[in-house]
Amino acid sequence: MTVNKHIRKRYKYVPFVLLSIVLAVLVYFFIASHSYSELVFASEKKLAPSQISYEVSDSDIISADIECRQASDGKYEYYLSVKPVNPGTASVEYKVGGVGDRLIMNSTGLGTIYEDEFLKFNGQEALLPAMLLIMLIVLVCFTHTFVEMFRAGDFSYSMAVLGGVILYLAGILIIITVYCVQEQVWVWMPLSFIGALLFYTGAIFPIVTAPAMLLLAAALFVSNIWLLRREGFRFQNLLSALLGFAIIAAYAAIMIFAVLPEQSGVILVRLSSAVQSIISYVLGYLECMLFSCMICAVLSTVYKPPFDKDYIIILGCAICSDGTPTPLLRGRIDRAIAFESEQFSKSGKHAFFVPSGGQGSDEVISEAESMKRYLMEQGIPEEQIVPEDKSVNTLQNMEFSKTVIEKHGSGARGKKIAFSTTNYHVFRGYTMAHKASMHAHGLSAKTKLYFYPNALVREFIGLLYEQKKKHIAVVAEIIILITLYCITPYLL
């Protein structure tokens, strides 16, 4: 059973649990909202009847009354109580102890009633806790799925997307919870306020993460300069700097739209607010995907595969002019040898080595042949080496090695496979193995630190490209929802 099937089986009851919570809350709302009650005044002394008055605009639609209750602290609390009579809209105007207001009430055909301006109704105290409970259950399930994928060594772009959703959901949940605790608004918050809270929470998410993101941008610039000085100028070596510039540009755009002066005109100010919110939401979403990609890349290097492998693919890279492996490639080969040796000592099982890599135009022999010679120099018998010498990139490494394994081992089904590569390249190896429909575990060989940031940025770009339909759908939803939220009040 694959890890995904195992996860689906374990969580098959979760939708029913969430649906049960939603239905229970709806039933509670339906029962509680058959009347409307609101605290309108509190006093140390009981008011005289002459200080209490109310008037209903249409008694055929609603009925009203003002009730006096003595609280546990001895104060007298006055509640406006409104009940539905027939479907429709009517107003109730009250004045208690010199304090008054006018409420527009909607009476529905279901016998429920709610206040029109802020969508307040009896039972709303369950709304925010229920919403946070649902978010928490989903967050726990997603987090447990993420942990299960890590334990199974199932590193992929799907895992990175899941991690990004977890980070975003956790951030939103923390911000809302902190706000509610500080403002003590757990009970009274009406539906319209909850919508506004969700809207502005997403909008301020990048503000909360700004220090970390700007520090990351600075680190990306520094690491990029380090990389260029060591490895020379190439476009792919500029990815870290480009991402750092994009982060700074996004925050600059948010600041520009935030400080747009009021005298610019109502329409322009509203438009700038919508654009600022869209940028903030999209930036927050992409930040979480970036951090998740980094987390997955790091986790893929520390994951320890079980010692049960039948084949170990060694991913090739450039070789020296004399045909010997470069230090980078030797690190990959040595890591494969060390793992196989440890596996044999612990389980008594040998693994076949699959050095994978073709011959470049400037190489005297194929990378596979260079690795084979090195393996034999280290005491590995030739019959334990199954070379693949046609591939020219990581995806072909996986696809062609899978074909070689199938021919050598009478099919790849049921075979336990690992691949050895440099630490910054492990996560990419996992994603390419998935693309080749091959389940394999990565072995991480150490290398110079300055390679890491640029490689992580490359994987982030790969995540956006490989899952582009999902990300485009999310960004489109953000734009549509924010636009509707901003313009709806002016269309009603």
Image (spheres, rainbow, N blue to C red):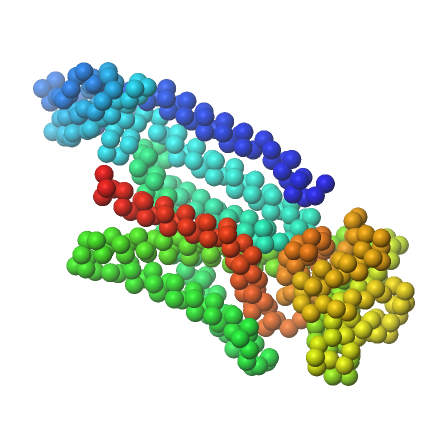
Near-viewer residue (252 or 68):
252
Q: Residue at x 80, y 64 (%)?
A: 354
* Residue 447, horizontal then vertical, whole percent: 67, 71
* Residue 86, horizontal then vertical, whole percent: 24, 17
Counting every numbered tag in the picture gives: 0
Q: Would you identify the image quadrant in which residue 305 lies?
A: bottom right
Does 114 appear above or below 163? above
- Quick check: can you spot residue 154? yes
Does 476 appear above or below 114? below
* Residue 131, horizontal then vertical, whole percent: 43, 35
Quarter of the rendering occupied by the N terminus:
top right
* Residue 291, horizontal then vertical, whole percent: 52, 57
Q: Residue at x 48, y 35 (%)?
A: 134
Q: Is residue 300 left or right of residue 406?
A: left
Quarter of the rendering occupied by the C terminus:
top left
Near-viewer residue (434 or 297):
434
Q: Is residue 159 left or right of residue 18?
A: right
Q: Residue at x 38, y 66 (%)?
A: 249
Q: Residue furthest bottom?
A: 322
